Amino acid sequence: MKPEAIEMVDTDKLIIHPDNPRTGNLSSIIQSIERNGWYGTVVAQRSTNYVLAGNHRLMAAQSLGTREVPVYWVDVDDVTARRILLADNRTSDLASYDNDLLLEVLSRTSIEEGLLGTGWTEEDIERLTGGEPEVIDDFKPITPDTLDTEYRCPSCGYEWSGQARPGEPTHESDYDD
């Protein structure tokens, strides 16, 4: 890598690559930039200004009103540019985690400073530990025992709650003539 290949570039000059098949989570990228600042570079093809790596970081920067980002320019043909674009996305997909170490780092980070800006949540930690995230629910479940009965059929004793619609039969025998 040549240091002179990296320069600050106006975000409006860069073009999101039209062949980028990856969809990104902009809200988590924005949170990361807001919490951690900008780090790294965008990789772009010099001849087209297409972003080959960092399309979603660029979108996040633009939505935050960032005027310039560091760009590592590569001088490659279109075929090589597409290979770089695909390789950047796919090599990330092929990676995996050491879940024990991940859990340790996430837990430590959560305790020390919280997870905001990491892309991870407390629910992710719960899943990694095999637990289910705690769901706070102020609503009591509705069961036949907790539902107030407003009506009882005099013929069969069936109980129900709610209003019957005018003209609507309220019992099976009402269907018989």
Image: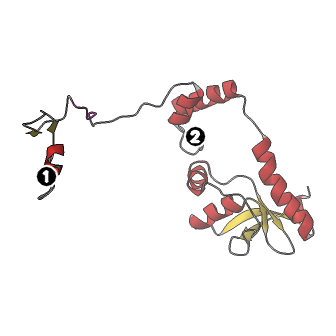
Q: Amino acid at mark 2?
A: Trp
- Residue at 57%, 24% in the rendered image: 129
Residue of label 2 = 120
- Label 2 with label 1: CB-CB less than 8 Å: no
The residue depicted at 62 percent of the width and 27 percent of the height is: 103
Q: Check the image and name the residue furthest to the front.
A: 177
Checking the image for residue 146, the label placed there is none
Query: Compared with residue 171, is residue 42 higher up or lower down, i.e. above or below?
Result: below
Judged by depth in the image, the label closer to the viewer, 2 or 1, is 1
Between 125 and 32, the one lying in front of the other is: 125
Q: Is residue 171 visible?
A: no
Q: Type of residue at label 1?
A: Asp
Name the residue rendered at 76%, 45% in the picture. 93
What range of the chain is rendered magenta? 140-144
Residue drawn at x 64%, y 64% as measured from the top left? 59
141 in the magenta segment: yes
Q: Nearer the viewer, residue 16 or 159?
A: 159
Is 78 displayed left or right of 24 in the figure? right
Quadrant in the picture for the N terminus: bottom right
- The CA span between labels 2 and 1 is 64 Å
Residue 84 in the figure: left or right of residue 114? right
Question: Residue 2: x percent and y percent?
Answer: 92, 58
Q: In which quadrant of the rendered view does residue 25 lie?
A: bottom right
Around disc 2, counting alpha carbons within 10 Å, would you say few (fewer than 14), some (14 to 19), or many (20 or more)?
some
In which image quadrant can residue 4 be found?
A: bottom right
Q: Secondary structure at mark 1?
A: loop
In this rendering, is residue 145 above or below 31?
above
Q: Is residue 136 visible?
A: yes
Q: Secondary structure at mark 2?
A: loop
Overall secondary structure of the magenta section: loop
Label 1, residues with CA under 10 Å away: few <14, some 14-19, many ≥20: few
